[in-house]
Image: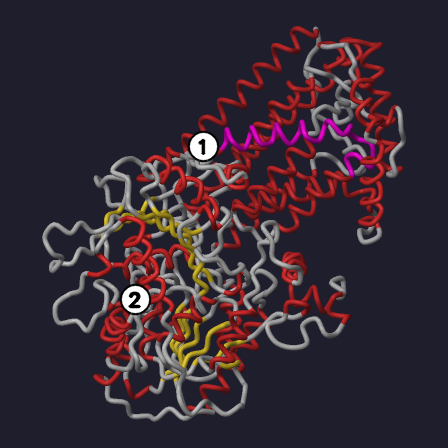
Amino acid sequence: MVLRMDRAAEDRGASPDNGQITDWLKRRRRPTLSGSHAGGRVSSNVEPRKGLVVVTLASLAFLGIGIALSKYAGTNFAALSSGEIPGLHINYWIPPLAAALGYLLLQCTTHYVGPIRPSWRTIAQRAAGDYLLLGLFILVVYVHFNIKMWIPLINPHNYDRYFFVVDHDAAWLITLFDDMRGLLARILPDADLWYQASFFGVFVLSFLCHALGRRRFHYHNMTALLLIESIGPLTYLIAPAVGPFIYQRGVNMLATTAELQMLNVYNLVRTGGAAWIRDHGAEFFAQPLAAMPSLHVGASFIIAYYAVRARLWVAPVAVLAFCWIFIESVAARWHYLVDLPAGMLLAFAVIAVTNHLYRRSPTDQDDEERPAAGRRALGKSSASVAVSRTSALQPAGRRQPTVWVLKCHRPGDHAQSLALARALGWPFEVKDTDFHWYELFFALASWATLAGMDRSRSSRLAPPWPDLIIVGGRPNETPAKWVRKQSGGRTRIVVIGRYWTPPDELDFVVTTPQFRLPAHPHTLHNTLPLQPASEARLAEAARTWAPRLPAAHGPYVALLVGGSSGPYRFSRETARRLGREATAFARTLGATLLVSTSARTPRGAMRALERAIEVPNHFYRWRPDDPDNPHFGFLALADAIIVTGDSLSMLAEACSTGRPVHMFEFGGGPAAMRGPRSVDPRIRQWWRWSQLKDQGILGLPYAFWIGLPASRLNRSRDMRLVQDRIVASGRARWLGDTAAAEADPPPPLDDLQRAVERVRKLMSTKQGETASRVRRPGQDGRLPGSEPAVAQPEPVLAYTAARARQHTLRQP
């Protein structure tokens, strides 16, 4: 009997007594302190009404400005009619109509198809706000083009000759743009069309993907586009210019033809004045000229920026479209060189205003902004979450060091920080942090500042200053150094993973091989990431889940599933192959599969995996903030573990159990987990279909950078270094490898214990604290607070002895 937790079983309400785990999938989500694979992000259904009101008022204000300018120019608004987009030869009504109709069709489809099917009421509520945004966008663009046509009447001056001086002096840069455009044009079909086509195409795709996806950045994206299209025509009036094509012809003949037609309209407006606009404005509505700044560059950057932040599948396409528009705007001579930074600066300003508009205080953040471990109940202070681990047997007068953990935006790194903080056994607080986009510049300069942090959405950093700060992720380093400066140098900084600050300026770094960091006295190189799967936690999970997984269905094989990461693409085909190989492995043991997916598992791949499994199984479809996530229960009860090779955190958790661990490899090309890697020169030919199929477009730069030496600018991770080390040590092997197992299991990993001892030594040496020498009575010399999270000399099997095993695991 195949035990699948499918939708039909859920609808029937099957209980664990019938061998299925469906009841805990139906429970309402509620906040819980969960592990690295139990936490996650979820979109909020709350529509930002305040933001919509502000955007509506801003659009109406722009309309008012347009009316005032029309009175000043002595003309009127052109009537809307059909017309072509210059340089594209399609009607300018097609993009917004495609967005509107495509949106309606896809929204209605979600009611019948997909794992989460919204009600018609929810769809109607979303559609009301989305069509309002689309309507406001059409209104703003309408006023925008009218103001562009009035430019010669409002400000008749022309600054082309000043802008062309820069182009003339930087002729070598223009040549570089032309050469880059020539290389890309060899790949793109009909390259002359893509300046306009890519812009309108990514606009439609981004609107649909944001609106139908997590929606977190949907309103950010549309608001920023509305603002740049409103402010843009007003900036045209400051220093009007036509474009460099009046001095030089570009390499795009289609664009040159459109530019000359638009120049003719510009000259007719200058000579005919307001009367010509009243008579012919509607006929040439889409053809007014304005070069400074480049709104194509600015708007495409905004689309790419929010697509990347929202992690949309269309993000690589948006980034490539932005790069093409950036190059083509100069190569086709639509814009001067100075137009590009001007457009980018305008985009940066608009993004900053938009992010400020939609900012929320820590207590107002939704599930998507804050994992369950970091949220507070109503009425509690939003400054921090205090987790006290003070030992009751601590001698009087001995003050334990205080610890702050700055929350990392990557759940895996944050889980490592929490694991170290708990293992130290000292009182610690979790401080939420959120950052502006420009924090990167302060990190590159290695400053000690809070200038890049969004204080309205972050916990308050104020005295009393901690003795120790544990951080993960680049953005958290600058506020950590600021805290150390405020404390007079007393606070010590421990960085988890990879650092940006030179290690001489840090107190301690806990890292792993994939980051390829050099040896340094302040750096501890561990084998695997720190992980929260302590013996106590696994024992508790086993007690919870053993009754739900009857022993008659054992032995169990846990299948821990990650997702796409860097050059490794977890596609549907990869998922099907994993299902087949896991099925074959389970059959050799007569075992039941316990499948635990994660936040990074794509939905399509998740469904393909579930369909490919042909043995009895309990299949958990990951849900954000699910209090009944069985990840650690599956891990604790498994007799053997299969883990996908993309997740080093899951690999560390699996190895900590002492059970046989099998890694599933996927991906190919120069960054292949196994295989020839760089031996065959053909695998370096990234344009081959086989490489694109293995890695996808987004994985290609990762694969390229992995092959280069690590540096401050090359931050690529090479997970193969950890995988090779684990296989060589005998702690894991590749799934399907028939090599004989080691007779004696390798010694347990002591990564966490080593990190704890080094941090305690750091605090004892530099602060004069004696906490590292204080031991609890009756202990055999172990440090206080470290026992629960440290591996014991033999495999962690104590809690499984309580469960009578009816099967003996045999090695395949």
Q: Amino acid at mark 2?
A: Trp
Q: Position of residue 779 (x, y in %)?
A: 17, 71
Q: How many marks?
A: 2
Q: Position of residue 293 (x, y in %)?
A: 70, 25
Instruction: State the SS at label 2.
Output: helix
In contact (CB < 8 Å): disc 1 and disc 2: no
User: Observer-nearest residue: 423 or 147?
Assistant: 423
Which quarter of the figure has residue 620?
Answer: bottom left
Residue 680 seen in the figure: yes
Q: What span is colored magenta in the figure?
A: 328-354
Please indicate whether residue 249 sits to the left or right of residue 747 in the image: right
User: Observer-nearest residue: 647 or 710?
Assistant: 710
Decide: is 597 above or below 346: below
For disc 2, the neighbor class at 10 Å (few under 14, some 14 to 19, many from 20) is: some
Give the residue pinned by disc 2.
Answer: 24
Please indicate whether residue 313 sits to the left or right of residue 56 in the image: right
Q: Position of residue 571 (x, y in %)?
A: 58, 67
563 inside magenta stretch: no
- Which of marks 2 and 1 precedes in the sequence? 2
Residue 458 seen in the figure: no
Give the residue pinned by disc 1.
Answer: 451
